Amino acid sequence: MEQDAPPQAGSVSKVVVSALVRGRGEASVAVYRHLAPLTVNALLRTLPLEGRVSSQPAMTAVFATLRVGVEKPRLAFERGDVAFLASGELLCFFTSPARSDRPLNPVGKVESGLEFLAAARPGDVVALSQPVQ
């Protein structure tokens, strides 16, 4: 008699979000509630979200109108990290290791497609949405 595999438990914390860079490609971003619960919940409530890109040397940032304060802030980030700058309302995708002068709320990690976010230029539009499951 063949045994069925036990059901896989999904993560309560991890939510996968799609980041479509118009004209360039799509990235898969995992956001984790345990990193900054208020920030991640505010982000998920506003989806779908579109924002224009603001490019910096070590990151691609997208304007996102989230009304949250500083939560579990960090100053150092690695390639692929995703964080929210509350003072500037920017969702930041780090394309190389970086240190910030201002505290950012860590929210997740780019799982695939970081090259599309790195190739985005000022004025490009990034559309964030939850993929249909």
Image (cartoon, grey):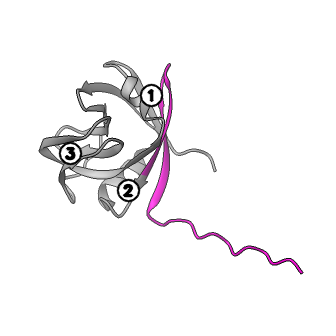
Q: Label 1 to label 3, Cα distance in Å?
A: 24 Å
Is residue 28 or residue 43 the one in the foreground?
28
Of badges 1 and 2, nearer the viewer stands 1
Which element is circle 2 on? Answer: helix
Q: Residue at x 38, y 56 (%)?
A: 41
Q: Mark 2 points at which residue?
A: 41
Q: Label 2 to label 3, Cα distance in Å?
A: 14 Å
Q: Label 1 to label 2, Cα distance in Å?
A: 25 Å
Q: Residue 46 lies in magenta, yes or no? A: no
**Quadrant for the N terminus in the image:** bottom right
Proximity of marks 1 and 2: CB atoms separated by less than 8 Å: no
Q: Residue at x 16, y 42 (%)?
A: 99
Q: Which residue is drawn at 78% across and 75% down?
A: 4
What amino acid type is highlighted by mark number 3? Ala
Which of the two labelled residues, at mark 1 and mark 2, occupies the earlier sequence position?
2
What amino acid type is highlighted by mark number 2? Asn
Labels in figure, total? 3
Q: How many residues crowd mark 3 within 10 Å: few (<14), some (14–19), many (20+)?
A: many
Give the magenta part as a residue range.
1-30
Specify whether 115 is left or right of 56. Answer: right
Q: Name the residue under label 1.
A: 116
